[in-house]
Image: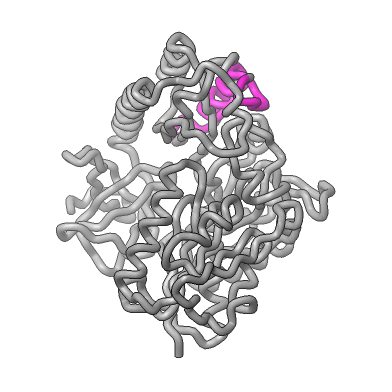
Amino acid sequence: MKRVAFYTLGCKLNYSETSSISRMFEQQGYKKVEFNQNPDIFIINTCSVTDNADKKCRKIVREAQQINPDGFVAIIGCYAQLKPQEISEIPGVDAVLGASEKFRLVELLDTFHKVPAGQQARVFASPIEDAIDYHTSFSLNDRTRTFLKVQDGCDYPCTYCTIPLARGKSRSDSIHNVVNAAKEIAANGVKEIVLTGVNIGDFGIQNGKRQTNFLALIKELDQIEGIDRFRISSIEPNLLTDEIIEFVARSRRFVPHFHIPLQSGSNSVLSLMRRRYRRELYQERVEKIKSLLPDCCIGVDVIVGHPGETHEEFLATFEFLNSLDISYLHVFTYSERPNTDALKIRPVVPKKERAERSRMLHSLSEKKKRAFYESQLGKVHTVLFEDDVQDGKMLGFTENYVRTVARYDPLLINETKEVFLSEIDGDGVVEIYEVDESLGVLPQ
């Protein structure tokens, strides 16, 4: 029985696909082991959103060689689709599989023979235009929450982004298949499903034609028994309709948490990026959410240092974000990516200036997160406890994404429980007290 290990770089979507591919191996008789347990086969699922992701891939290959010099190393994922020949020349790599081939990994590499020294890795990478099939994917038994892929690819030509080049056109699963996958996940005792994809608000395109939409999907999922929570991972502001917000506000299972990419708070920079909205629409979405869900957590993606972004435009982004009732930021420092239109835009922001802008927004994010957490103190919420124990305490998230800590109790792992949010500890995590059936506070 050959032993196989997986390493995933990047987003929740990658994690869902890695997990599904690992189950394919197990169904064929392979034994899944940890990366450091001397596997015979290493599968590295890559990201290529930034140049740092490329460097990480090379580092993981070196680590694999140190663990088992005779181990077979295969590279899949976005980096593999974008630069298959470049990866094939990395010492230690035996095979590279692109977007159309990664789900055929077991079939294409059934022997998993190590490439002899001096020979180049085998490459299976079709043009991205051939990536038209949809593969149902979800993570299982990896963490408390499950990542369920409902959509793949993107039709948005943002200037800085390589994802359409790495994953192809927007395409989706059917509602029927997503519901069946969610029922299978529920049967495995999972309490929370995170819906993921490249552009999940664009859900509903099959074989190049729109068949349905995201609102219809979440209405169906809301009826599934056995899942306590559904969480929407990220949704574009122009696709986050009033109807979706209103549905989540009255939903039985969809939690009050939205992650909405902004990228810039300057309309002129949004135009440079070829984003499909203006800051005014973004503000309307935030205000609509907060009017219906005052305790809702709102996360924001923002890019600093995009070519053409002036200091004044960055300050406009900073002030805009500071004015919004949001909960945290994911800050990305712009990095040059081959074959993207941003490379043609001038002037280029110096890297030192990009780093300073990133530092400022990270500080703002900490301020926003602290303020949001403080606004939740003294309230009762429901926490899903994770199998994550540190110094005798266990961690979990409320339905509105407040990170919490409580005294360790093995019976609480993968359980949801009403709690009273008490205070913020020195690490910025909210301490909790258990709430009994009569809502009396029981100190932990």
Question: Which quadrant does the N terminus fall into?
Answer: bottom left
Q: Which one is nearer the viewer's eye here, 268 or 421? A: 268
| Any part of residue 371 in sight | no
Q: Where is residue 212 shown, x and y percent of the image?
A: 79, 48
Residue at 62% over, 38% down: 339
Residue at 54% over, 62% down: 76
Decide whether the magenta segment is chiefly helix, strand or loop: helix
In the rendered view, tell whether residue 384 sits above or below residue 325.
below
The answer to which image quadrant residue 428 occupies is top left
Residue at 26% over, 53% down: 434
Q: Where is residue 371 shown, x and y percent of the image?
A: 32, 27
Q: Is residue 210 left or right of residue 419?
A: right
Q: Where is residue 388 shown, x and y percent of the image?
A: 29, 60
Count the marks. 0
Which color scheme did the rendering employ for the protein?
Answer: one colour
Q: Is residue 34 left or right of residue 203?
A: left
Residue sticking out furthest to the bottom: 1
Magenta highlight on residue 73: no
Residue sticking out furthest to the front: 118
Q: Which one is nearer the viewer's eye here, 208 or 442? A: 208
Q: Where is residue 246 shown, x and y percent of the image?
A: 63, 35
Q: Which one is nearer the viewer's eye here, 282 or 287? A: 282
Read off the magenta span.
Answer: 272-295
Question: Which quadrant does the C terminus fall into?
Answer: bottom left
| Any part of residue 91 in sight | yes
Residue at 42% over, 17% down: 318
In the rendered view, tell whether residue 317 sits above or below residue 41.
above
Magenta highlight on residue 274: yes
The answer to which image quadrant residue 274 occupies is top right
